[in-house]
Amino acid sequence: MHKNPPRLLTTAGFAPVVEGDCACASSTHAPLPAITNTHLLHIPDDVKRLPLDGNFHVYLSPRARQGASVLNGEAVSILGRFESPLAASPTDTPEEQALIREFISQGLLEAFPCPAAQPASSEMLTAWLHITDRCNLRCAYCYLPHVREDMSMETAQAAIAAIIRSAKAHSHTRVKLKYAGGEPLLRFPFLLQLHEYAKKEMQNNGLVLDAIVLSNGIVLTEKIAQALSESNIRLMVSLDGLGNYHDTQRQFVDGSGSFSKVSAGINTALKNGLTPHISITVSARTIDGLPHLLEWILRRDIPFNINFYRENTLSAVQGDMQFNSERMINGLREALKVIEADLPRRNVLASIIDRSNLYSAHTHTCDVGESYMVFDQNGRIAKCQMLIHLPVANIHTQDPLRAIRNDKTGLQNLRFEDKTDCKTCDWRYWCAGGCPLATHRATGRYDVKSPNCDIYKAIFPEILRLEGFRILKYDSTAKTN
């Protein structure tokens, strides 16, 4: 007789918001194989396990459908029966049988030997639309020259047509448009007109549209916030710190800081029912201010993601932005303390550390070279927005996504199996090796681990532990176990 009923708690209902200015990686989830009572079951070697308070443990499997799982002591004991391959017992109670099915669903158990399963292809095709190169800021890490050029409606419509051609050719059923710049809100009437056109064209071609505008928040007004909300366009705003921490990286043309304007824009969005997603770029200049920024964000219950500064040709002169591993690890640990003190309902497994996503396994760090296209203001198409000046196709290419996938001369976004040290790493399914562009800039190679590898390995266990405590906080049944 169990002292407490065995419990498996998951992040169900609290799925993370996976967003950013990059091409977020697609999940590798494939359909679960059919498992019967005659199968031997065992705990896969790649399942992660960390202790929490009391008898609770947090688990993470690359086959998980709902991120991490928390098990109480009684559930841990039942799972432990399968350390070696074993069939489910016919004497198991209905409750134990249900729990074993949950173990299988969350990837904590699999058939032995494991049946082969192919990763599922991504439903989403993501396209960055660079509707203007004009900007009212001159951010220290920006990779754009900011020439005064805008995308014409003719070019924009041709871009939508090219996106649809590739989506249908590669069996994508969903399209995400990222309206970007420059500062896209400087062309807000054009943005709305383009979005209405895109909605109609996607609908006519049986595609589901998701849209987000990537903004610095400076010119965000009540009218714009209301229009974005009414048009179902999400908003991402860049905010790198409070006060001087933000201002040291994101300044106006005259060198003055932009924090007061950006924070006012965020508050305007919130007052008008539009919850922005905050994109944080952390460098050596701002890491010390990250804990205070997260306090500010958590008080407002805003989703966020943390990105590491990536050097580019234009920002290379900003030498004081480069960070070392020790300082970044210490800064992130202080930030995690802030989150632990005010755990949000929202899942943060995909938010805290750069290009990684601990909620869902993936084979590539991002979708660059796979299901991502970047359209510049003139209709040229690149693999990554940071390489927007190196196009591999244009709006007249019949299938630009195929051209991107076939390009072997530019940026190569390899699977983790093809990267030295990554293919055997314990965290390979959730990290996939880090930003390939940053790795190539640091090492001259794409097939090696990220220069930030030490940071990732130090922080990943702490993020998983944090998620375990978050699940316990918001699952009412945990309090009785």
Image (spheres, grey):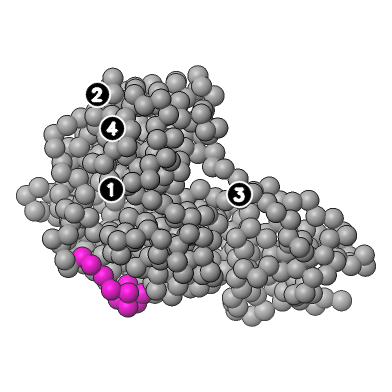
Q: Is mark 2 on a helix, strand or loop?
A: loop
Per the model, the C-alpha gap separating discs 4 and 1 is 14 Å
Q: Mark 2 points at which residue?
A: 152
> Along the polypeptide, which appears first: circle 2 or circle 3?
3
Mark 4 and mark 1 in contact? Answer it, CB < 8 Å: no
Q: What residue type is labelled 2?
A: Ser
Residue 85 sits in quarter: bottom right
Q: Name the residue under label 3.
A: 119
Q: Where does the magenta region start and end? A: 321-331
Of callouts 2 and 1, which one flags the residue occurring earlier in the amino acid sequence?
Answer: 2
Q: In which quarter of the image is the N terminus?
A: bottom right
| Quarter of the figure that contains the C terminus | bottom right
Question: Majority secondary structure of the magenta segment?
Answer: helix
Pointer 2 with pointer 3, Cβ within 8 A: no
Q: Is residue 335 left or right of residue 287?
A: right
Secondary structure beneath disc 4?
Answer: strand
Disc 2 versus disc 4: nearer the observer: 4
Give the residue type at disc 4: Arg
Q: Which of 254 and 145 is in front in this view?
A: 145
Q: What residue type is labelled 3?
A: Pro
At horizontal 55% and vertical 32% (from top left) the residue drawn is 171
Picture mark count: 4
The residues bearing labels 3 and 1 have C-alpha atoms spaced at a distance of 28 Å
Q: Which of marks 2 and 4 is nearer the N terminus?
A: 2
Q: Please determine whether, in this image, residue 205 is positioned above or below residue 232.
A: above
Residue at (27% x, 46% y) in the render:
387
Residue placed under numbered mark 4 in the picture: 380
Image coords of residue 345 (percent x, y): 52, 58
Q: Earlier in the sequence, mark 4 or mark 1?
A: 4
Q: Which amino acid does label 1 sit on?
A: Met
